Amino acid sequence: MKNASLILFILLLSSCNKAKEGLQDVIASNMESALEAQTGTQVDLGDASSYADNKGVVSFEADGKTYLTKDQSLQAVAIIQEDQDGLAISFQLAGSEGQSLIAIVNHVPKDFSLPLTAVFNKSNAYDGESPVATLIYMEASENTMSTSPMPFEGHLIITKLSEKEMAFQIDSKGGSPMEVENPSAWKPILVSGELISPIIQSVGVDKSEVLK
């Protein structure tokens, strides 16, 4: 519940108007102090100056359908959290037309190096060795919410993780939740993503010790 509240605060801050960066920095500083006092956890909500060059570009294909192309410019946010088995790293990319892609890697050892490989599996269970990957895609219109197939096997590889640029690749197979126990129905899911000057937010960890 505590982590969910922190993420809600983070997402609300990220959606603020870019033209109000000075005010955002004040709000962010006050919010960081309040959250740290309440939770006893180190919080960094990011620097509003990074909004200027912020951009995410993603190509995303699943089951023969193209969901995102690299000519679409998205807002790019990276969130780094302390996890029960190390770290959790998530990439959140959102478009102006209701598209939202979230790639999450859990159970990352604190001494990891790049490239970092995480695995998809049907249950998202941690085997005690390999970081676990999750991919969520949603597209909202005025009256509907649609999703894409979900990966049930394969890999997510983080190749870059710096303040200026982050990048990841997904090569997987999956389908709808109804197909999770039917591997013969799984289709390829391919993603290539870049986050340029991402808004980097951290909870419970010093991001300077994680970025490469």
Image (cartoon, helix red, strand yellow):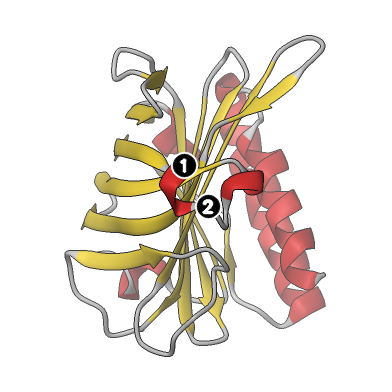
| Callout 1–callout 2 Cβ contact below 8 Å | yes
Q: Which residue carries the number 2 mark?
A: 182
- 199 left or right, relative to 2: left
Q: Quadrant of the C terminus?
A: bottom left
Q: Relative to residue 199, is residue 163 drawn left or right?
A: left
Residue 58 placement, left or right of 77: left
Residue 59 quadrant: top left
> Quick check: 133 above or below 110?
above
User: Is residue 123 among what the camera can see?
Assistant: yes
Q: How would you rate the neighbour count of disc 2 (Cα within 10 Å): few for under 14, some for 14-19, many for 20 or more?
A: few
**Mark 1 belongs to which amino acid?**
Ala
Three-letter amino acid code at the position of disc 2: Asn
Residue 78 location, x and y as percent? 45, 50
- The reply to whether residue 197 is visible in this rendering is no
Q: Which residue is mark 1?
A: 185
Real-space CA distance between mark 1 and mark 2, rounded to the nearest whole angstrom: 6 Å
Identify the residue at image location x=57%, y=54%.
180
Residue 191, how many percent across, how many down? 32, 37
Q: Nearer the viewer, residue 113 or 157?
A: 157
Q: Secondary structure at mark 2?
A: loop
